[in-house]
Image: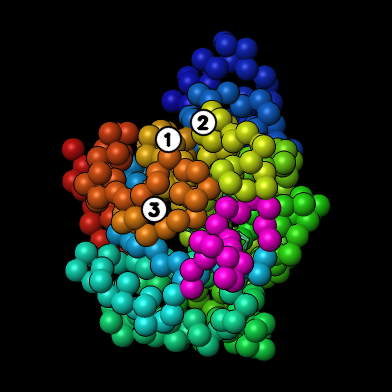
Amino acid sequence: MFSTLFSLFEQSGISTEMIRMAEKVTSGERISIEEGILLYREGSLPYLAVLAEHVRHKINGKQVFFNRNIHLEPTNICINHCAFCSYRRKKGEEGCWEFGIDELVKMAADRQLSGITEIHIVGGVHPDRDVHFYADLLTGIKKILPHVQIKAFTAVEIDAMCRFASVTIKEGLGLLKNAGLVSMPGGGAEIFDEELRAKICPDKTGSAAWLDIHRTAHQLGIATNSTMLYGLLEDYTHRIDHLNRLRTLQDETGGFNAFIPLKFKHYNNRFSHIEESTTVEDLKNYAVSRIFLDNIPHLKAYWPMIGKQVAQLSLAFGVDDLDGTIDDTTRIYSMAGSEEQSPTASTEQLAEMIHGAGLVPVERDTLYNVIRRAEVN
Ligand code: V47
Ligand code: SF4
């Protein structure tokens, strides 16, 4: 089947390297760093779509996942100064917030009847909140909602909250796991290249430390996600270097559930003068990520960031996860200018988006256990 398809590409003048790469991917061989860069530089959208669809299908069949979740954002007060961030505020500055444990537990309890299976917690690095504070928060939530799974805290938050309590990362993650943490989101990875990182987020946890915190989480049995911030100063070699560092850690631990490309949004931050990436570039990035990261099972399109239309389109470029219902509980991307200013999706809407792309909607929990699968026609 693929030989027929790729002979069509051959007739349209595709290079021999691209044909060779298609053979490699379809026979399950891993592509190299140089080939990854070539995919970004030379891969046409239809070529990338076919290869990414092959990898997606091999791992996930026709299934596309979503879940019922809300976000809790305890605070946007942050000691860091990432130049791309539209969200952080200084303590006391207009627009800052810092909810206490009781308030946050109440926010979670208020959604008790909505059928959520996941609470995603992420926020700024607050100078006065350590790992004991956050462990108490998780304990409080689990008391009221024992069946809900908690995915919480980027490696950057974990790094700081453990330092503030003078405990090691392993001890801190152990405390959080005992309090109910089952998974960590993938934020804070940004771009691993050290020179670029110094320009866009100079005071943030470094790349090696980010990877090490995820390694420790995996060793403790905490699943994690991974991300890459793209569309901001980097070139394709930086992107492949980033993906390669994730692929290498995944070979070692197998602990990443999903990879989520995060498109730079430019509203109201220090890089507002930089144009946002085009939809073609976004789709290309999903496809190359799917092809290169042959060992991370899920590729997520986070619809509050790219919008529902592009998220649906991304299902033809290797994506197999649309994240969740959200219920208007996150501000990170609305404050950075996303068209989704009050992000909310019903399960019917998410299932319809997936059906519409010719795939099978599957409701999952945080750890990708199947909750409900639609009948295949
Ligand atoms: O680390 C902040 C990014 C991340 C901007 O694991 C920005 O399921 C683009 O990690 N433009 C936090 N990106 C969000 C995050 C996340 C989101 C969805 C799902 C999951 C998951 C994780 O947001 C930060 C940073 O990389 N970010 N500002 C911006 N202007
Ligand atoms: Fe703080 Fe996160 Fe914003 Fe960086 S991206 S300034 S760590 S809230």
Tag 2 and tag 1, C-beta contact below 8 Å: yes
In what quadrant does ligand 2 lie? bottom right
Figure quadrant of the C terminus: top left
**Residue 357 position (above or below residue 196):** above
Q: CA distance from mark 2 to mark 1?
A: 7 Å
Question: Mostly what secondary structure, the magenta segment?
Answer: loop
* Crowd around label 2: few <14 · some 14–19 · many ≥20 (10 Å): few
Tell me which label, 3 or 2, sits earlier in the chain. 2
* Crowd around label 3: few <14 · some 14–19 · many ≥20 (10 Å): many
List x then y, in percent, for residue 154: 56, 67
* Crowd around label 1: few <14 · some 14–19 · many ≥20 (10 Å): some
Q: CA distance from mark 3 to mark 1?
A: 14 Å
Give the structural element (helix, strand or loop) at label 3: strand
Label 3 CB, ligand 1: below 8 Å? yes
Stretch of the chain drawn in magenta: 81-98
State the residue position of label 2.
279
List x then y, in percent, for residue 31: 65, 41
Q: Is residue 325 left or right of residue 212?
A: left
